[in-house]
Every structure is written in structure tokens, then in C-alpha cells.
Amino acid sequence: MNIVDIAIVGSGPAGISAALNAKIRNKSYYLFGTAALSDKVRRSECISNYPGIADVGGMELHGMFTVQLSKADIEITEKRITGIYNMGNYFALLADQDEFYAKTVILTTGVETVRPIAGERELLGRGVSYCATCDGNLYKGKTIAVICDNVEMEEEVSYLAELAGKIYYRPLFKNSSFAAKDTEKLSGPVTKILGEERVSGICLKDGTEISVDGVFFLKESVSPAVLLRGLSVEDGHVAVNRKMETNIKGCYAAGDCTGVPYQIAKAVGEGNIAVHSAVKYLAEQMIKSSEK
């Protein structure tokens, strides 16, 4: 089992900063994310408060990030983390059918673009899933609802369509052209997941209730509180101290997921702090281990 020093979840400015500093400190690490880095950065028209770079466009800054990562020989592990498990002295990170292991974790997931709906978190693992590859086989021939917030993930919708008997599909973006056998597109939003012990259905905005066996949320960003059970959250953001420490030993958070202001300069600084805190923690753990 290969256990790296630091797993960084998210490839926005905070994650990039964390990876650069982990590399400088000669720590082994994973940087989970996408080569597209940050959609928020790329869409920014003009960034005028980043020290040393005056009035830079989002695509230009994205290009600078990409070049810097390449020069530092930092690779992005293009996997979407769907679960993190605290194993005591290390963390297990689940990405579809793959597992990765790290002594520390830094959450740089950004702000969840799609807010959870009623019943979503309460029924997680009891009919609600964020991973098509992990749980799709449980719904062969069954009826499911799929809610997807970006076109890139429609490949997973297609995978689910091959397995399920019937799909009610709700894309949360414009101009979805997805079509598949036994798939019905919902014209209105899903407002609630129905069920007590397990998912039994969904409720639409107009009050219509539809019976389903399960609900898949295919999101670009999964809430840190969902990724890691027991993580302390305040006002929808990961609770951290000045050292970027969360309530879970060895777990840190940085960037927009820790709260306002949602600024690139703030995210970069927090990513730097998080790595330094993780490095100190790793050194302390090594001393404790040698004293046993």
C-alpha cells in the first residue's frame, strides 16, 4: 500500500499553491483535480487584486498556473474524489473503483456550486449516491433519478442508462443534448428526496412525486462534509483555525471552501499555510513513532 505524505483534493488556486509548496518541501503528494484547473479562474474577466500581476484576465492567469505546474513537474491526478475515510493514522481516498492513501489531507474543493436538496445528505448511502461507477451495478434494471451539474459528466449518465431500467434525468445546465433509451428528461427541478430508511422517490417543484429506487448526484464538486464524515462545518464552510486545521487531526482545508472572501489571493495564501501545517504535523508524528 503506497501512502503519500499529503493528498490535495482540488486543483484550484489553493490546491495549486499547496502542491507547489509540498513539492518545495520535498513531500510526496497527490494533487486531485482536472487539467482545466479552476472554472472560476478561467471565467474571470479581470483579476486586479493579485499582487505582482496587474489586471490579468482569467484565461491568462490559468495559462500561467499551467506553465508553473509544468515547470515544477507537478502532475494532476485526474480523479474525482467521492469519499475520504479517516483510518486513524492515515486517510483512504475513494475515486470510483480506485483507492489512494495519504498521511494527511488538504481540502481545496472550492464552494459547492449546487446546494444540497432536502433528503440528499440524510439518505446518503441509503439510495443517494455521488458515484456512478461505485454504485451503478446496484441498480440494474431499476428506476433511478440522475441529477447532473456539468456536461462532462454525462458520460456517467450514459453508463447508468445502460444499467438501469428507467432513468429520470435532470441536467442543471443549459442545452443538454443527452438522450438514451428509457431515459426521461425532467423539465422542472427536483426539490426533495423522499424516503425514511431508504430512498423511495423524488418530489418536483410543481409537487409531482415520482417513485425511484435511487438518486445519483453527479456533481463537479462534492461538499467536504459529504466527502469526510465528522468534519466540522459552519455556515456551509469547513471550520478551520489560523493554521488551516480542521477538527480532524491530519486534515486541513484552504480556499473558498473555508469561507469568504472568495478571492484567489486568499486561497493561495491558505494553501501555503495548510502545507506548512501538514509538514509540521508529519514531523511530529515521525517523532512520536520513533519514541515508541
Image (tube, rainbow, N blue to C red):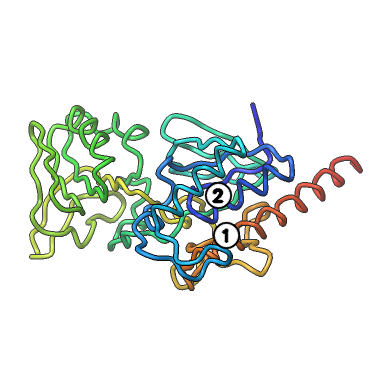
Q: How many marks?
A: 2
Q: Is residue 268 left or right of residue 291?
A: left
- Residue at 24 percent across and 48 percent down: it is 148
- Regarding mark 1 in the picture, which secondary structure is present there? helix
> Between residues 4 and 99, which one lies in front from this camera angle?
4
> Between residues 66 and 255, which one lies in front from this camera angle?
66
Q: Which residue is mark 1?
A: 268
Disc 1 marks which amino acid? Answer: Val
- When the figure is inspected, residue 45 is found, relative to residue 151, above or below; the finding is below
Disc 2 marks which amino acid? Answer: Ile
- When the figure is inspected, residue 225 is found, relative to residue 155, above or below; the finding is below
Mark 2, residues whose alpha carbon is within 10 Å: few (<14), some, or many (≥20)? many
Query: Picture coordinates of residue 205 (x, y %)?
Result: 13, 64
Q: Which residue is mark 2?
A: 16
Structural distance between the alpha carbons of marks 2 and 1: 8 Å
> Between residues 92 and 60, which one lies in front from this camera angle?
60
Query: Picture coordinates of residue 235 (x, y %)?
Result: 45, 73
Q: Is residue 187 left or right of residue 99?
A: left
Q: Residue furthest front?
A: 54
- Residue at 71 percent across and 45 percent down: it is 24
- Residue at 84 percent across and 41 percent down: it is 289
